Structure formats: structure tokens, C-alpha cells
Amino acid sequence: MDNKNYVPNLFGSMVFNENTMKERLPKQTYKDLKKAIENNSELNLEIANVIANAMKDWALEKGVTHFTHWFQPMTGITAEKHDAFIQPTADGNIIMEFSGKELIKGEPDASSFPSGGLRATFEARGYTAWDPTSYAFIKDNILCIPTVFMSYTGEVLDKKTPLLRSMEALNKQALRILKLFGKDNVKRVTTTVGPEQEYFLVDKEYYSKRLDLMLTGRTLLGAKAPKGQELEDHYFGNIKTRVAAYMEDLDRELWKLGVLAKTKHNEVAPAQHELAPIFASTNISADHNQLTMELMKKIADKHGLVCLLHEKPFEGINGSGKHNNWSLSTDLGENLLDPGKKPEDNVQFLTFLCAVIKAVDEYQDLLRISVANAGNDHRLGANEAPPAIVSIFLGDHLEAVLESIENSSVYASEKATKMELGVDIIPKFTKDTTDRNRTSPFAFTGNKFEFRMLGSTFSVSGPNIVLNTIAAEALEQFADTLEAAPDFKTALDDLIKSTIQKHKRIIFNGNNYSDEWVEEAEKRGLLNLKTTVDALPHFVDEKNIALFEKHNIFTNVEMHSRYEILLEEYSKVLNIEALTTVDMVRRQILPAVTSFMKELSDTIISKKSVGLSTSCDMEKGTLTQVSTFANKLYEEVEKLNTLLTKAEERKDAYDNANFYKSEVIPAMEATRAACDGLEVLVGENYWPIPTYSDLIFRI
Ligand code: ADP
Ligand code: MG
């Protein structure tokens, strides 16, 4: 085997990428396709036919029999429906065919995907349309065509369409700003994303004995193991052989699909790990992150493991998040959030930086909403992930620079020079050494922002739709002001200064986990939308609807439908969790506890019957404790069950979600507390489900 070229040859081998296209498409077709992508224009059917045919031949050579339009409905995961290439011929045989029409457009039944009342079932048709900016690929012997998904009447039903639109909105406004800096040669600004993905691995055998893990992805019951993460011996620790084999397999499969899997390591919690890819254009990154999550699960299965992507699989140890590293990059390769080497780039950098600061301050609510779901509510603000309060970390150095601009003082550095633009700026920012503030929700890390509030199950599309759109809005306002100004330099100077003054409240370099910050943030007037139910209603605030409508991302109707979907999803998740809790307690835990109590009682009776003179203190003591907890558990689970019947009565989606939040969650917690109290008293052989020690340490 050619070891040296093993990985390069493997990489992208299952992707109809640039190389494959160049190799297999007629020159003119390739050019036409590139042009269509560049200009965002439609492909004509003739060209599509040629591309489809080349794709099919390539796929057939790799043993593929079917194709699918691969799309991202609002469920947050991907969807596919497989069609064989076969076409019957007159003589009763078949040929393998794939037409341009089939490549460009599909018509799946849209009625079974969430739409938030956008569609009645009688107009259930939806269609998928090829997104040529993301390469087709082969997965499980299926040719997958990345597509957008919309209703027949044109309403957006997926996460990709608004993401592409938001990238377009940002491109438009960023180009206006660059033009003002004399950069006419830049043709396109793209947002880039590198999502760091956290996950847990547990043994499949234990997993399959836990109804809660199987149905909800997290443990609804379970006493803490004697050991947790307190020894801090897992982060970056030695990777167990079984896990290492899994990671190796995962890397290879991802590389075949062109995913730039780069870094892997153990995370803080036992059995928790992370994978980080090299960043890519946001659209590709979103597709790749979906593939990564899918493969993480599939490959775990091959290794007798189960990959848990839930935000909080285990109580008492850290849950999993996803860090969304985000920046802006031009077609000439310039990173617009890189302070750069030349002073004039600094000013341009400061303009983009200020736009982001303004955007984050003005749309804290949208950023918070973009990371809201039932699972993430367990993490945000729980001293393991950023709080629900959105703020920006800039580092002392950059903050000092902004302060000096605001006060028109010379930045206190030897290298400080007076810029012509009137702002005092140092020629080159050094990377801040304190950029390791892991508590900040939105941290500037040298040449990008790291949005750290995402939960591990999230599609990165949602948060990036928000980021791109709010940044586009701020840049648009900047461009409007600057283009109209008689003197660009003075206007820019004023703009940067006033933006800092107006929005500096969003900058916070301290410990985001502290109680003092909660108080301080309140004084600053920052939002603290603690739970999903607190956050979601702001999605349809007038200012937010106006924003998305203005940039053609969502219509008013689409926003209300999305709001509805999010509320419903929240209630459904909690309903399933509560039902599962009731089921496990009634059918597994209480019967097991009864057996244990019987054993204790029988022992007491037997001991007495043989006329032992020693006491039955141990048996009686244990029986009393167990019996007390068992009664408590019975009482709590009955209460929970009664609440669930009441939950069904509510018709309004918000009322319903709020009921789950304020009534059902506390009841579930009380049930759990009683159950966990029992777990540590009941004999190991009696306890019917694997324990935290089994799940976290036995792998
Ligand atoms: P850390 O753990 O310190 O956050 P990692 O190396 O694990 O660092 O992750 C950093 C992530 O940031 C990687 O996915 C990387 O590709 C991404 N990244 C780096 N530069 C950019 C950029 N310009 N735009 C978007 N993402 C970026
Ligand atoms: Mg990170």
C-alpha cells in the first residue's frame, strides 16, 4: 500500500468534487456550472443533463444503485428518499439512468415534515432543488444530492435555504464596505465556520437496557457515580483503545466524504470526546457537520458503541456543546476578522469588528433563541457552558484599543501610532494571550469569533442564519452612513467611536459563570432569557420580523410558523421524557424495589422463625429507608402522571410549552430525586437498569 498517499487518495474519494468534475465533465459544461454557481443563476436543463449523466457514471463505477435528494428539514436532522437509477426498456430489460431533471428537482411529500401550519395536508407537495454550491457525494451506496426544500407555493421548509440567503445578504453588505476601503477587486465575501463537536460514547449493551437513553437520548434517572470528573483526568487524556479505533474509523469515513476532520481529543467529562474540522464555507460546513453527526452514530454502532449527541446525557457531569467558529473571508483569501499586518487593514478590521459588536448587542435575543432547545436548557448557565446572557469577549488588549478610540486617547503601547483616520491604533494587534476565557458565550479568538452557546445536537444552520443576518444589518447601516458622508475618514472615525460608545455594554472579559456577572449584566440592561420558553417568544418580536423580512431571509408567515415549530418541539420532547420517566419508574424501578423489600422482609421473618437472638437492625433499617423512598417515588410519579393528562388539555402552543417548563419539569425532577435516593440503597442485583458507573466508566 502506498502509505504516503493513503490519506490524500482517500480524501474526497466519495465526493463529486472539483477534481472529479474537471476530469469527467466536458470543459464547457464545467465552465457553465462554475459560472452558474458564481452568479447564483439557474442551470439550463441541457447542462444539467450532461452533469447528471457524468455523476451517474461516476457513481455506478463505485457500485451505487440509487440516488437521493439530501435535505435538511426543520427537524434539525437530514432527510433522504432513495430512488433507483433503473429505467425499463421496451424489450423488458432495464438501463441505469439519471436525468438533469432528476438532478435539479425532486418532489417529496412534504406533509410529514414540520411546517408550523404553513401547509394543509391537501397541498402537501413540496419540492427539493439542487444546491450546486455543495458537492454531491456517496454515502451507504447512495448518490446524495444536497438540496434545498420548499413548499409548492414557495415557502421555505428547510434550514439550508435561509442559510444560503443569509450568506448572500452578508456578501452584499460586506462588499459595499470593502468598496469604501478601495477593494473593488473583491468579488465575493463568504462566511466561514468551523464547528467543534462534542459527544459521548457508551457501550451498546448498557445503552440498550436504558429506555431513557433509547427514547430521549439522555438519562432521566440515575444516581451519580462515586467518581465523576472531579479528578480532571479525562480532558486531553490518553484515549482508550476501543475509542481510538472508533475515532480512526470515523476520521477515514469523514475524509472519504471530503470532511476536513482535523482534531480529536478527550473532553472534560469521562466518556466525552470532541472532533474539530478545519473550517469551510458556512454552507459546506453545515452539510459536513450533519454528515459528521450521522457518521458518529453509524460508526459507533459498528464498534459496539453508541454515540450520544444529546446536550445533557448525564446529570452531574458536563454536557456536550458545539463551538461555532465564525469569520468572513473574501474570494481573494483575506480574513476580514484578522487584524492584519498593515495599519489600514486595522481600520477595516475595526469596522467589521464594530459591526459585529453592534449586531450582537442589538440582537442578543435572536442569538439566544438560535441556541434554545429543551436539551440546551440543562447546560446554559449551569457552570459548564456559557450563561443564557449573551456577551462578547474581546480580551484585554483589544478592549483597551477600543477604549482608547472611544476616549480619543493614544493607545498605551510603544508601537502606537497616530492613524490618519483620526483614530489611534497600533499597527498590529497581537493575539490576546487571555483568549482562553472559556466562559464567554461569544469570544474573539484572534481572527474569528467563537459562538459557544450551541448545543451538541444543533444544526449550525440556525445560529449562522442569525449571525449572518444581524451582521449584514449592521454592515448595511454602516455602508448607508459611510456612502452618504462627504468625508469618508471623518465619518468612519465618528462611526467607530459612536458604535463603541453605544454598544460597549455587550463587552465582558470576566468570568461569565459568576453570580456577580448576572447582577452586572442586569444593570447593563442585557437580556437574561434563562430558558427556551423565556426566549422563544422574542423570535416574533416586531424588530426581528422586520430584520428577516428586510434581508429576504424569512417572511412574517414563515417566522410565525418557525416559532410554532420550536414551541411544539419543546413540548413534545418534554412529553416524551415525562412519559418515559413514568414508564421506567412504574414498570422497572418500583417492581425491582418491591422485590428487594420482600427479600428484606422475608429475611426478617426467617431470622425470627429460626429463633435467632441477634436483632434485625440492618434489615429493618434498610427496609424502613427503602420503603420511605419508595412511597415518595410512588407519590411523585403519580403526580407527574396526573400532570401529563392535564398537559393535553392546553391548545395554545406557548401555554403548553410553559406548562411543561413550570409544572412538568419540576415534577420530573422530584421523581428523579426520589428514584436516585433509592438507587443507592437497593442491592445491585435488584436494580433493573445500568448505573452511571456502567455507562460512563465501562467502555
Ligand atoms: P479551540 O479548542 O481552542 O477552540 P480548535 O482547534 O479545537 O480550538 O478549534 C478551532 C476551530 O476554529 C477549528 O474548527 C478551526 O477550523 C476553526 N477556525 C479557524 N479559523 C477560522 C476561520 N477563519 N473561520 C471559521 N473557523 C475558523
Ligand atoms: Mg473552541
Image: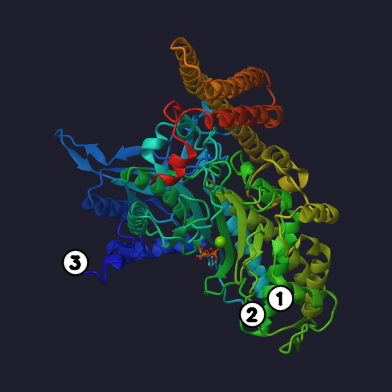
Are there few (<14), some (14-19), or many (20+) residues within 10 Å of tag 3? few
> With 647 as the anchor, is 696 left or right in this view?
left
> With 362 as the anchor, is 8 left or right in this view?
left
Q: Residue at x 39, y 65 (%)?
A: 31
Q: Secondary structure at mark 1?
A: helix
Q: Amino acid at mark 1?
A: His
Tell me the CA gap for discs 3 and 1.
51 Å
* The N terminus, quarter of image: bottom left
The residue at the far top in this view is: 609
Residue ID for mark 1: 397
Name the residue nearer the viewer: 20 or 644: 644
Does the residue at mark 3 contact the one at mark 2 (Cβ under 8 Å)? no
Residue ID for mark 2: 430
Name the residue nearer the viewer: 258 or 575: 575
Residue ID for mark 3: 1
Q: Amino acid at mark 3?
A: Met
> With 313 as the anchor, is 650 left or right in this view?
right
Q: Earlier in the sequence, mark 1 or mark 2?
A: 1
Does the residue at mark 1 contact the one at mark 2 (Cβ under 8 Å)? yes
433 lies above or below 441: below
Name the residue nearer the viewer: 170 or 356: 356
Q: Earlier in the sequence, mark 3 or mark 1?
A: 3
| Residue 198 in view (yes/no) | yes
The picture places residue 597, in percent across and down from the top left corner, at: 51, 18
Q: Secondary structure at mark 2?
A: loop
Q: Amino acid at mark 2?
A: Thr
Q: Earlier in the sequence, mark 3 or mark 2?
A: 3
Q: Residue at x 60, y 19 (%)?
A: 634
| Residue 476 in view (yes/no) | no
Write down the quadrant of residue 157 in the picture: top right
